């Protein structure tokens, strides 16, 4: 009889707790401002594996893998993507990714050449810096399969990029997403006649730390 | 009589509790995984394994893109590389490093095969995914 009563009290308490939680959930869901399909609130950025919705919380990996925030805390902040500025992190030597699978001393061969693309619309021209790209990549990653290394040979459009072609092979998947318009569209129209070197200096400014490139700490 | 009523009451409470537990347990949760996380589920589901989650960010801290995408031959496409365990233990793809020498070896199955069952192959949070396959994952391709 006593155990029955205890059981009853226990279930009552549990259901009361659940009811409170349920009401809270409902009131949150009823907030018309809560709907935002594509944007994550800061509280939902860089969650640990067990809470990221892709890892199975039951799996060993979810517990054992490193939470991204732990790695990112020492790196310069970014506006989107991983919310980390990878190019800056490399320039500041906050990270020292190998350029070779086995050799930690291997250095990339940097190419400091800016390509200015005059765009058709009202947006500023695009300045493409080879320098930051050759920090990470090999020439063969882009040439000739994605970009023919010849002036005027590549038709590029934002539509193609959004569909994951051309720049969109990386930008919008792993490299900074296309929402950061100004990082590419960086040269005001009318300045197109300026030399490539000048334009480049302006465009490469965010990551311009020539002495620190490719360094291993 | 009184006891009977009590029992009836507690039965209702238990039923309500169970119902709410079910409701909470199965509430759909949206994926908020890292930008660039790749889910590979070409063979995993069929083979009864959890799909593989590849964290780009973690590898990017340690290696430049060139190491995997030029030297090891990974194409820039989720699911485009036809990776299987045989290739990996023969030292191709992931196996070039995950061999107990450069990185931990293949016996740690669950560290890679850690995704939710049924998650389709994808680059998580890619522009393409946002445009074409919004919210909560896409149908299996």
Image (spheres, grey):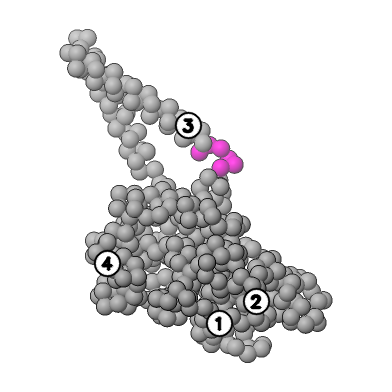
Q: Quadrant of residue A175?
A: bottom right
At mark 1, the secondary structure is loop
Secondary structure of the residue carrying tag 2 is strand
Say if A86 sits above or below A77 in the image.
below
Q: Nearer the viewer, mark 4 or mark 3?
A: 4
Secondary structure under badge 3? Answer: helix
Residue A12 shown left or right of residue B55 in the figure: left
Residue A7 in the image: x percent, y percent? 24, 20
Residue placed furthest toward the left = A1
Q: Which residues fall within the magenta stretch?
A: A29-34
Q: Are labels 4 and 2 assigned to the same chain?
A: no
Question: Disc 2 designates what residue?
Answer: A129
Q: Position of residue B85 (x, y in %)?
A: 26, 72
Check disc 4 and report the residue beneath it: B106
Q: Do the residues bearing badges 1 and 3 touch, measured as CB atoms within 8 Å? A: no
Alpha-carbon span between mark 4 and mark 1:
33 Å
Say if residue B131 shows up in the picture: no
Image spot of residue A47 (x, y percent): 46, 50
The picture places residue A49, in percent across and down from the top left corner, at 40, 52
Q: Is residue A92 left or right of residue A185?
A: left
Mark 3 and mark 2 residues within 8 Å of each other at the beta carbon: no
> Which residue does the image show at 64% across and 72% down from the upper left?
A211
Q: Which residue is mark 3?
A: A24
Name the front one of labels 3 and 2.
2
Q: Which mark is residue A109?
A: 1
Q: Would you say the magenta stretch is mainly helix, strand or loop?
A: helix
């Amino acid at each position: 009889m006593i155990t029955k009563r205890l059981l009853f009290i226990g279930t009552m308490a549990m259901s009361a707790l659940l009811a409170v939680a349920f009401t809270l959930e409902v009131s949150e869901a009823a907030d018309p401002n809560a709907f935002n399909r594509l944007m994550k609130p800061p509280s939902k950025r860089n969650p640990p594996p067990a809470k990221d919705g892709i890892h199975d919380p039951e799996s060993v990996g979810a517990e054992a893998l490193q939470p991204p925030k732990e790695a990112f805390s020492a790196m310069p902040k970014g506006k989107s993507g991983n919310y980390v500025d990878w190019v800056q992190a490399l320039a500041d030597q906050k990270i020292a990714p190998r350029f070779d699978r086995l050799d930690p001393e291997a250095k990339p061969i940097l190419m400091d050449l800016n390509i200015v693309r005059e765009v058709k619309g009202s947006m500023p021209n695009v300045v493409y810096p080879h320098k930051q790209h050759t920090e990470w990549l090999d020439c063969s990653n882009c040439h000739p399969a994605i970009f023919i290394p010849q002036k005027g040979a590549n038709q590029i459009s934002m539509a193609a990029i959004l569909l994951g072609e051309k720049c969109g092979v990386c930008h919008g998947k792993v490299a900074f997403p296309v929402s950061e318009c100004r990082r590419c569209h960086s040269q005001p129209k009318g300045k197109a006649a300026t030399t490539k070197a000048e334009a480049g200096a302006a465009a490469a400014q965010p990551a311009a730390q020539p002495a620190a490139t490719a360094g291993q700490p | 009589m009184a006891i009977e009523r009590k029992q009836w009451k507690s039965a209702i409470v238990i039923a309500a509790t169970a119902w709410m537990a079910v409701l909470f347990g199965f509430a759909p949760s949206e994926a908020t995984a890292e930008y660039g996380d790749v889910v590979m589920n070409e063979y995993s589901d069929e083979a009864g394994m959890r799909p593989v989650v590849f964290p780009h960010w973690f590898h990017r801290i340690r290696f430049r893109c060139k190491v995997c995408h030029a030297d090891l031959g990974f194409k820039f496409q989720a699911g485009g590389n036809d990776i299987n365990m045989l290739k990996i233990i023969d030292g191709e793809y992931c196996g070039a490093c995950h061999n107990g020498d450069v990185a931990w070896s293949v016996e740690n199955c669950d560290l890679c095969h850690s995704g939710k069952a049924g998650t389709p192959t994808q680059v998580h949070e890619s522009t393409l995914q946002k445009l074409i396959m919004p919210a909560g994952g896409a149908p299996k391709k």
